[in-house]
Amino acid sequence: MALVQLVCLASLCMTSLWGVVQTVKIRSYNVALLNLIAHYEDRKPNVIQALQSQDYDVMCLQEVWYGSDVSRIRQTLGSSISVHTAPLYQETMFWDWINAPPCHKAAFTVACIFIHCSSITSKAALTNCSVGCGMMSESQACISCLVVSGKGALRCFDYTRREAMNVPGVVLLSKKKVNSVRSVFFEPNVKQILRRAYIEAEIEGVGTVICSHTASNIGDEYYEPNLRGVYSSWEEQNLADSRKLTEAARLSYKPLIMGDLNTSPSIPVHNVTADFEDAYNHFLSEGFVSPYVTMVGKCTYCLQNPLTHGSNHSHVLDHVFVRDHAVLSAKRLYVEDIPNLNFPMSDHYGIEVEVASGYL
């Protein structure tokens, strides 16, 4: 009888407290706003509309590469949601008086790539051929634009747009007050075909938020030209990125590390295959948990998504890793097809983790 009374008392206390718990909805979404993923122009307005209309407090976006897309997101969201990126890379001309497109000085390099490399289908071989044409001697803005634009590379020479580049592709959105924010590149002062970084912010009522997109599994051959003496594989680079993220969070208050972190555990019940699992285990060893994995566990990069390509398996690559937070729920988002179209907004699905931020 005493045990029953104790359980009832605990339930009443929890019910009383539940009404005053402040909750925070944290989302991560790889929106794939690049020409290499099909239907970019059709998907973009739907993505931006979702960012404006959906119910969330903090969101980490990945693969928002073009400065014009960042600007459109800022304009659409207005002052109610703060938008944070690494400093955009903007090329200039006429003694820095006028903005220029990313590759305005790279005509000979791109012509060489078009003539000698355009028929190559292997990513590693294409990169090696492009490097042979002098790609890595061009600006980082141009390199990034060429890599993410693929056959749409004319955008990199468009003098009507004069595109800036959000080189790491990450964007942090917050409806809550951001007290401080900084961006950090994993490999400072190194030109890369895919340069990676994280945004770290102190957000009121949330804690330390780290938004990132770490090295991905893009083949057996490691072909990042200027890092071949540092890493021998994409998996090794991914693990190094993951260690830098947890090191940044080591002394932080209530840290959250989120984004497309390109690491997946094996979850057989949901047909999820492991990928770069050492990095996932590293986060666990540092005291973090991925509530989406433990509470949902369904793929976020899935074979059934018509926009995915180059993978034979389904993975959970997208995470909100938390430490010292009370987790209330987790769910998968943005799975549905765009109305009147037969594909969703991205080749990834989004995730949400809801945590308690404190008591009134």
Image (tube, helix red, strand yellow):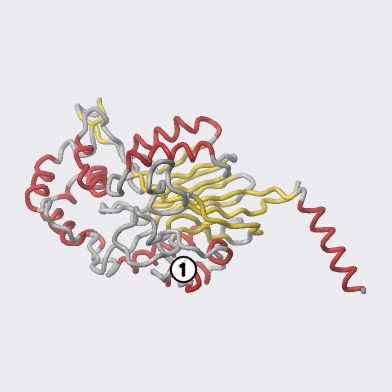
Instruction: Report crowding for label 1: few under 14, some 14 to 19, many 20 or more residues within 10 A (C-alpha).
Output: many
Left or right: residue 155 compared with residue 283: left
| Residue drawn at x 44%, y 67% as measured from the top left | 264
Q: Nearer the viewer, residue 124 or 101?
A: 124
Q: Quadrant of residue 158?
A: top left
| Residue drawn at x 37%, y 56% as measured from the top left | 186
Q: Nearer the viewer, residue 128 or 328?
A: 328
Residue 308: x %, y % from top left: 34, 56
Residue 94: x %, y % from top left: 19, 27
Left or right: residue 208 compared with residue 341: right
| Residue that label 1 marks | 280
The answer to whether 225 is drawn above or below residue 268 in the figure is: above
Residue 212: x %, y % from top left: 43, 53
Q: Nearer the viewer, residue 64 or 42?
A: 42
Residue 140: x %, y % from top left: 25, 46
Question: Which amino acid type is marked by label 1?
Answer: Tyr
Left or right: residue 345 compared with residue 354: left
| Residue drawn at x 43%, y 41% as measured from the top left | 339
| Quadrant in which the N terminus appears | bottom right
Label 1: which secondary element? helix
